[in-house]
Amino acid sequence: MPLTPFAVHDLAEAVLGCVCAALTRTAQEIEGQPGCPCRACVVPGTPAWDSCDDPCGEEAAGGQLSVSVARIYGSSDAEFPSETRIVQGVRGCTHPQITALELVVTLLRCAPTLTEDGCPPTCDELNASAQVLHVDMVTVFNALLCCLPGTQQTRRGRRFVMGQQKVIGPEGGCVGLEQRVTVALPGCGKCPDDGEESL
């Protein structure tokens, strides 16, 4: 069965909300840890590093959180998350058993930089920035593990595979993380009528 029109976007928004809520909870538990950035959005394609500072004022957490789609491809119950090599078009509107969706969660924070005098950041500043990053890494990873199963209302929950998480930056005063996750999207939509012209 094909996907519904909003299957991809709705899931991306759900992941964004889940990660944002987890970052907020962690900030309440750990003194000095910034929460969910006020700049948090689903973005088309690779996210631009528009802001890792505090664009919303001193009351809001600085940084930038985004969820984007890396790729979408056909898979099967037996092979997920591997890509299927089944030839399509032989029997009209046939679809893969599972559509695999790879999402990318990107979180940026400010990184310590050179002072006006050209001095490098102190070890204390670097250590504090590293702690924020490391707590963010665990928080994002745990958030996806805990909330993704509940984004599909079935007895078994949603199938997904955690991908690589890596540190990105520091660059341009920003440092952060990129977490990939591949999610199974079962088809629920209707096929176009066989009589319609194909594009």
Image (cartoon, rainbow, N blue to C red):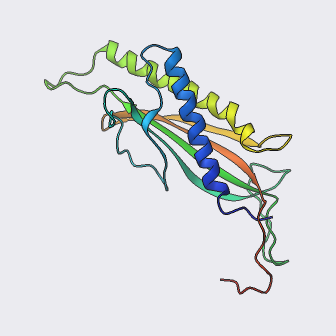
Q: Is residue 179 visible?
A: yes
Give coordinates of residue 69: x percent, y percent: 57, 52
Quick check: 54 above or below 40?
Answer: above
Quick check: 99 above or below 23?
Answer: below
Which quadrant of the structure image shows residue 60? top left
Quick check: 40 above or below 110?
Answer: below
Residue occupying the far front of the picture = 59
Q: Quadrant of the C terminus?
A: bottom right
Quick check: 23 above or below 122?
Answer: below
Give coordinates of residue 73: x percent, y percent: 69, 59
* Left or right: where 11 falls relative to 21: right
* Left or right: where 106 falls relative to 173: right
The answer to which of 32 and 118 lies nearer the viewer is: 32
Q: Is residue 168 visible?
A: no
Which quadrant of the structure image shows residue 176? top left
The answer to which of 167 and 158 lies nearer the viewer is: 158
Give coordinates of residue 45: x percent, y percent: 49, 55
Q: Which residue is found at the position 42% from the left and 16% from the top?
A: 32
Q: Which residue is found at the position 82% from the left and 78% from the top?
A: 92
Q: Which residue is found at the position 39% from the left and 16% from the top?
A: 127
Give coordinates of residue 106: x percent, y percent: 49, 40
The answer to which of 72 and 15 lies nearer the viewer is: 15
Which quadrant of the structure image shows residue 142? top right
Q: Which residue is found at the position 70% from the left and 47% from the top?
A: 183
Q: Quadrant of the N terminus?
A: bottom right
Residue occupying the far left of the picture = 117
